[in-house]
Amino acid sequence: MCTITPISLTVGANRIVPTIAIPHPLGNPNLPMDKEYILRYALVEKALKALQTEITEQTIFE
Amino acid sequence: MIKIVHYINQFYGGIGGEEFAGHKPEIREGVVGPGLGLSTQLKGKAEIVATVVCGDTYFNENVEEAKAAVIAMVKKYNPDIFVAGPAFNAGRYGVACGAICQAVKNELNIPVVTAMYPENPGAEMYVKDVYMIQTKNSAADMRKALPALGKFITKLINKEEIGSPAEDGYIPRGIRVNYFNEVRGSTRAVDLLVKKLRGEEFETEYPMPIFDHVEPHAPVVDMKNAKIAIVTSGGIVPKGNPDHIESSSASKYGKYDLTGFDDLTSETHETAHGGYDPTYANFDSDRVIPVDVLRNMVKEGKIGSLHNYFYTTTGNGTAVANAKKWGAEIAQELVADGVTAVILTST
């Protein structure tokens, strides 16, 4: 899970989930805490989905 | 007089460190920061007429907007040459230097050059399109980097032919150039083979490129019973950074117990990372490693369990060889501990 996905591709990561921003990949300080939690939950859900997906090459899960 | 526009980041622009990395691009008349040393190398043959200063985080998070804004600024000065950096091993700065050089070259059709350490991610991403003077991995190399950069720019000014990477000090771009060798290929091949068989030193004429290619692992079939572990290069550590993991160029990684932590707070955890503004991670480290969400997902039955330990280091300036070694060690432990899958977060 990372924000600068081209770097993840360069280093050979296979399942890549784009995130919010460099200093807070899994959060957004502009949101109220409860909304921020929902955002983070959705991102982790996306990561779990990526882990359960059959892939044959490097894949960015938008 | 040849006109040059120079691109630097917020740090070299004197605006500030990480807390100012979100700074939007601005242009200033004349030389700023390293441009001063660079202009003395040009010995009056060229003048740095303006300097673009842009925050590294801003550039990387808003690549298209940043490129468009910088190009518009550069265009006004109608320069003959565009220079960015040197970026050394600063990852986001290197990516920005590579990206903006490529964009200026394509849009304004003028020669461009930057300088960085070959392991900088910006090198691999843009070296095919942009001449990059090879530097060492820290700004301590500035006194050598600027003369090398100056020498290359002088070649551009004089419209001299650019030589091989070894001759002109730039990072190899993976381009082959035809030339006549006095000894024919078959003889050279046999000579190499004989040297190899004798155990003597030999230098290949065509080094194989190094690709980091990993076969994708099979997907997780039974997520409800899976054990998930967290690994991060975002530098999250227990408050106080007990093992003193370095804020950059880390020499180690940490392994920390998550038992009893359902939600990371500013009381319990912080980041040791010196390559991004730590304010947000220090306030709530779940923003980098989502412990709160994963704990709840265990309760909800979405995943089987969260591995008791998380692994962490600071990923900025860290040697690739070290990172590879640690990754292998961490993976081995995780497998031994029965971990099904890993979520790796990166800042």
Image (cartoon, rainbow, N blue to C red):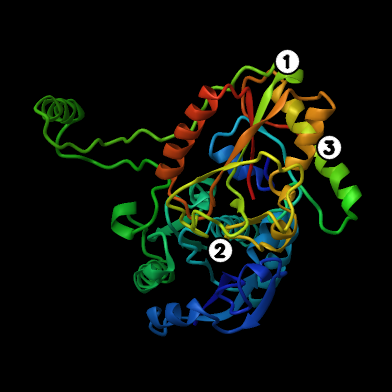
Total residue callouts? 3
Q: Which residue is mark 1?
A: B222
Q: Element under label 1?
A: loop
Whole-percent x, y for residue B13 in the image:
59, 77
Q: Amino acid at mark 3?
A: Ala
Name the residue located 19 percent from the left edge and 40 percent from the top edge.
B181
Q: Amino acid at mark 1?
A: Asp
Q: Chain of mark 2?
A: B
Q: Which residue is mark 3?
A: A42
The answer to the question of whether label 2 and label 3 lie on touching residues, with beta carbons closer than 8 A, is: no
Query: Nearer the observer, disc 2 or disc 1?
Result: 1
Query: Nearer the observer, disc 2 or disc 3?
Result: 3
Residue found farthest to the top? B221
- Please say whether residue B90 is visible from this viewpoint: yes
Q: Are marks 3 and 1 on the same chain?
A: no
Whole-percent x, y for residue B299 in the image:
82, 29
Q: Element under label 2?
A: loop
